[in-house]
Image (spheres, rainbow, N blue to C red):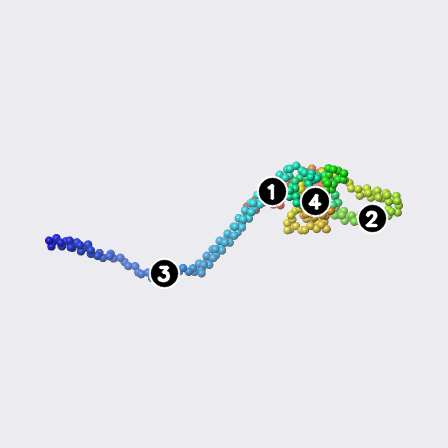
Amino acid sequence: MAASSMPRTLARNLRHAVVPPQWSPQSPPISTSSAAPAISTLPQPEQQEKRDRSTWSKVLLFIPGAITFGLGTWQIFRRQEKIKMLDYRQSRLGIEPLTSNEIVPSIGNLDFLEFRKVQSKGVFDEKKSIYVGPRSRSISGVTENGYYIITPLMPVPGDPESIQSPILVNRGWVPRSWRDKALAASEDEPLQSSSSTSTQESAKTSRWRFWSNKREGFEEHLPSVIPVEVIGVVRGSEKPSIFVPANDPNGSQWFYVDVPAVAHACGLPDETLYVEEINEHINPSSPYPVPKDFNMLIRTSVMPHDHLNYTIT
């Protein structure tokens, strides 16, 4: 009995015996005080300077890109606007022309009338012509300077088909010599008027001479009325750039078309209708003035293909 209980007691003691842990090499203790400087949360001055430089570099690279993108987008929108504007002008020029007597000119309805063709009949008052320029014209690769000539078209007395009120007509391009002759003739007019006055005073000495000179003077001043048919396009004043000088009406210097100012210089109302002649049938014996052609009428200073080139570049 005692012998059988001994193995049980021994087994129970072995089961509850503590197994010593296995030996393992011990690592040296880690000193937290020595690692603290390496893991410092405060940035060093050099690192902060590098970060600032990186930030400014990104900003300086972003700004030119944003500006270029914005200008390119704007040029695309401007190109679409120009295409629509040219289509609008072409459609307006394709409409049958109005007669000038159907139009009541006023400043308010200029936008409604612009680029509408108008047919007019009257007589040109050559003495009141105004020259706008200089404007260059290329002929067979040779550039020649000249002017646009604007002349009042006056009603024909007793002709119901003629215009009832004067209009301004841009007749086209003329050489510089035209303007020089016109200025020389205007300077000679005061001398001619003074000589005619002295002739009239001397004519009073004789009744016969008085009447004969009166008849001759009447025939000399009788205007040669030659009606003309004009087909033109209603236009408005030009918008000069900042580089174009101001007009000087007193000195007969006109650098751009200012319709109210030109009308005032011609002795006409400010709301006088202004048209640009488009007659394509040029008389070979009288090649000047040269009217604007269809492409010159609808074109602008910056065309759609120019906006496309600006976008690409």
Distance from the alpha carbon under mark 3 to that under mark 4: 93 Å
Front: mark 1 or 3: 1
The mark that comes first in sequence, 1 or 4, is 1
Distance from the alpha carbon under mark 1 to that under mark 4: 25 Å
Residue situated in front as seen by the camera: 237 or 307: 237
Whole-percent x, y for residue 234 in the image: 67, 42
Whole-percent x, y for residue 293 in the image: 66, 40
Residue tagged 3: 35
**The residue under label 3 is which amino acid type?**
Ala
**The residue under label 1 is which amino acid type?**
Met
Whole-percent x, y for residue 23 in the image: 25, 57
Q: Residues within 10 Å of mark 2 (few under 14, many from 20)?
A: few
The mark that comes first in sequence, 4 or 2, is 2
Cβ–Cβ below 8 Å for labels 3 and 4? no
Residue tagged 1: 85
| Mark identifier at residue 159 | none
The mark that comes first in sequence, 2 or 1, is 1
Residue situated in front as seen by the camera: 129 or 305: 129
Distance from the alpha carbon under mark 2 to that under mark 3: 118 Å
Cβ–Cβ below 8 Å for labels 2 and 1? no
Residue tagged 4: 272
